[in-house]
Image (tube, rainbow, N blue to C red):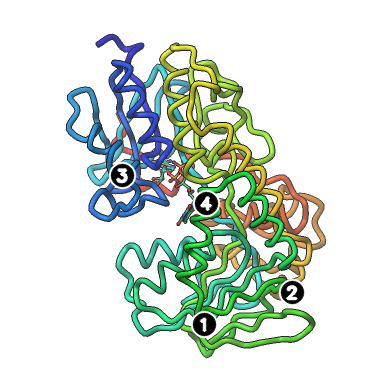
Amino acid sequence: MTSERLLHIVGSGPAGLAAAHAALDAGASVCLIDDNHAPGGQIWRGGPGRWTDARATRIWTALHDHPRFTHRTGTQVIGCADANTLLVETADGGAAIPFERLVLCTGARELSLPFPGWTLPGVTGAGGLQALIKGGMPVRDRTVVVAGTGPLLLATAATALRAGARVAAIVEHQPWSRLTGFGLALLARHRGKFVQAASLFAALRAVPYVTGARIVAATDDDILRGVTITTGGKEVTYSCDFLGAGFGLVPNTDLARALGCATADGAILVDATQETSREDIWAAGECTGIGGVDKAVAEGRLAALAALALHPSARDIPGLRASRAFAALLARAFAPGDALKTMCRPDTIVCRCEDVTAAQLLPHRDWREAKLATRVGMGPCQGKTCGPGCAFLFGWTPPDSRLPIMPASARALSRIE
Ligand SMILES: Cc1cc2nc3c(=O)[nH]c(=O)nc-3n(C[C@H](O)[C@H](O)[C@H](O)COP(=O)(O)OP(=O)(O)OC[C@H]3O[C@@H](n4cnc5c(N)ncnc54)[C@H](O)[C@@H]3O)c2cc1C
């Protein structure tokens, strides 16, 4: 196998798995790198034993013992040594992985917005709470509230219910009129998604779904005791043990930016065949724009075929157009509204690594000035959480990607050859 037929892929979520599958089908070899111990990424989290989506099982059956497939699990890409060498951290230390053609399928992370009490134990992102429950955190007979905006709230509430939790409320920021418009658009143009949403709502029928609402504060006596929300001019408090607060997703672009790929509107910039601004790197899935699992699968396939110079056209990829139209609909329906800025009070911590409050940030004009004066974004997360938060609150351009892009141990860094 010549090296131009070896494809490196970062991320084994739906996009990365679909890319690997298409590449193997086309006769190439694949090295799939992911920091988790099981394939699946976010939506297919937990590995083959837990999947209910037949696509995931079908793809993995074709991949897992294929002679041209290498799966590097538990391998976190922490940066690059040069334009064509990835640096990774594993349990054994560090390594350098050279590549000629790379497909980035690095997914997304949650947009966390600050409100009083968001740093309390028991408060997580909505997707974070879902991931913890899927990972085995016991919530049976405990009370959960999910709040923020977007379909992930429903998915998290459903996961919590299935795990035996009581879900006291789903608190959605968007008004009912906008949600109705979204539902009607699904019915008219994305029938399959409408059916999925309807069955989610049916599973959640006993849970209050509060719309046009936002969080006022999470309340505590050292640990989370409840959450107060405001809706229709009234404040309502729910007692809870866990609060999952999520306001949408933000594409993971750190590695792409470290490799010199251009971004636009917070996502990796790609052309019609998923090629980035670098001619040897392609990108697919949530890292190129939030759109869900169908978009990730379709784009993964397209990116792999393009990376192997098979000249695919977007028209040849089933479901691609529809999934992109769905992504656009999703973005319009669930864009976080300006009213969510009012959740953040002057004494609310915005940078939770460095304990920097909104009042300390307000006098500054941009991210750089604020960083120099307050240490915002200089903690372990390097602005991955507060960067998008500050972009939303103050309109600041998020920080540049710095190496290592993830916290890495000195042991790993020193062992990279
Ligand atoms: C917390 C969370 C929960 C979600 N839950 C749902 C849900 O229940 N239903 C739903 O429809 N959608 C959900 N989504 C949306 C989800 O992103 C998509 O539906 C789908 O998983 C996107 O597939 P993807 O392949 O683009 O990315 P992902 O599935 O996110 O896969 C990306 C993979 O890349 C890996 N990765 C990223 N950077 C690196 C690196 N530097 N080194 C090594 N590996 C790396 C990640 O660990 C991950 O395994 C969720 C998103 C998030 C953030």
Q: Confirm whether residue 121 shows in the render.
A: no
> Callout 2: few (<14), some (14-19), or many (20+) C-alpha neighbours within 10 Å?
some
Q: In which quarter of the image is residue 247?
A: bottom right
Residue type, label 2: Arg
Q: Earlier in the sequence, mark 2 or mark 4?
A: 4
> Where does the C terminus fall, quadrant-wise?
top left
Residue type, label 1: Ala
Q: Could you say where residue 53 lies in the image, as x and y percent from the top left?
A: 35, 48
Q: Earlier in the sequence, mark 1 or mark 4?
A: 4
Give the residue pinned by disc 2: 345
**Disc 3 on helix, strand or loop?**
loop
Seen at 26% across and 35% down, the residue is 71
Q: Quadrant of residue 289?
A: top right
Q: Which of marks 1 and 3 is nearer the N terminus?
A: 3
Q: How far apart are marks 3 and 4 (CA)?
A: 17 Å
Q: Tell me if residue 217 comes above or below residue 360 in the rendering.
A: below
Q: Which of marks 2 and 3 is nearer the N terminus?
A: 3
Give the residue pinned by disc 1: 168
Q: Could you say where residue 4 lies in the image, as x and y percent from the top left?
A: 36, 11
User: Of tags 2 and 4, which is closer to the observer?
Assistant: 4
The one of 93 and 117 positioned closer to us in this rendering: 117
Seen at 56% across and 24% down, the residue is 276
Q: In which quarter of the image is residue 25?
A: top left
